[in-house]
């Protein structure tokens, strides 16, 4: 009977640890939303998000070797930029049905 409280304690400790780990991975607020860029232009919107999502593979490789290139523009309009970015990524990597076109 002594192993049951230990099992319960271990389960609680693992659950709390998993929640802390997942909470640490959560994205924080973006202070650059709806702010102007360095050149004075407004925030990037849907079309820029779409373009930057499509060039993500190239941008990622370049960002590994330089600090002046990042894969995501923080000066964006919020949700519409994110929609364009994810849509651009999905267009490059086969869209939502790309996984169903496996050669058999």
Image (tube, grey):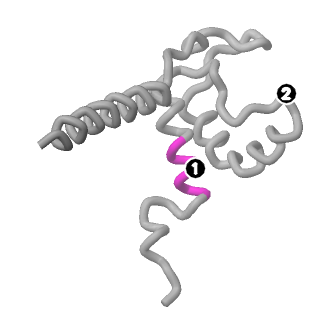
Residue at 56% from the left image edge and 27% from the top image edge: 45
Q: Residue furthest right?
A: 65
Residue 40: x and y, percent?
74, 9
Q: Is residue 91 above or below residue 28?
A: below
How many residues crowd mark 1 within 10 Å: few (<14), some (14–19), many (20+)? many
- Ranked by sequence position, the earlier of labels 1 and 2 is 2
Q: Which residue is mark 1?
A: 89
Q: Is residue 98 above or below residue 50?
A: below
- Residue range (magenta): 86-92
Q: Are marks 1 and 2 in contact (CB under 8 Å)?
A: no
Kindly state the secondary structure of the residue where label 1 is placed.
Answer: helix
Kindly state the secondary structure of the residue where label 2 is placed.
Answer: loop
Q: Is residue 31 magenta?
A: no
Q: Which quadrant would residue 16 be assigned to in this image?
A: top left
How many residues crowd mark 2 within 10 Å: few (<14), some (14–19), many (20+)? few
Q: Which residue is mark 2?
A: 68
> Alpha-carbon distance for marks 1 and 2?
21 Å
Residue 22: x and y, percent?
42, 32
């Amino acid at each position: 009977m002594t192993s049951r409280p230990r099992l319960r304690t271990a389960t609680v400790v693992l659950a709390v640890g998993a929640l802390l780990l997942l909470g640490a991975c959560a994205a924080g607020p973006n202070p650059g939303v709806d702010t102007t860029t360095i050149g004075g232009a407004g925030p990037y919107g849907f079309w820029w998000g779409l373009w930057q999502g499509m060039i993500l593979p190239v941008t990622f490789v370049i960002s590994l070797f330089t600090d002046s290139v990042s894969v995501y523009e923080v000066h964006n309009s919020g949700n519409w930029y994110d929609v364009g970015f994810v849509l651009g990524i999905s267009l490059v990597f086969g869209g939502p049905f790309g996984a169903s076109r496996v050669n058999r």
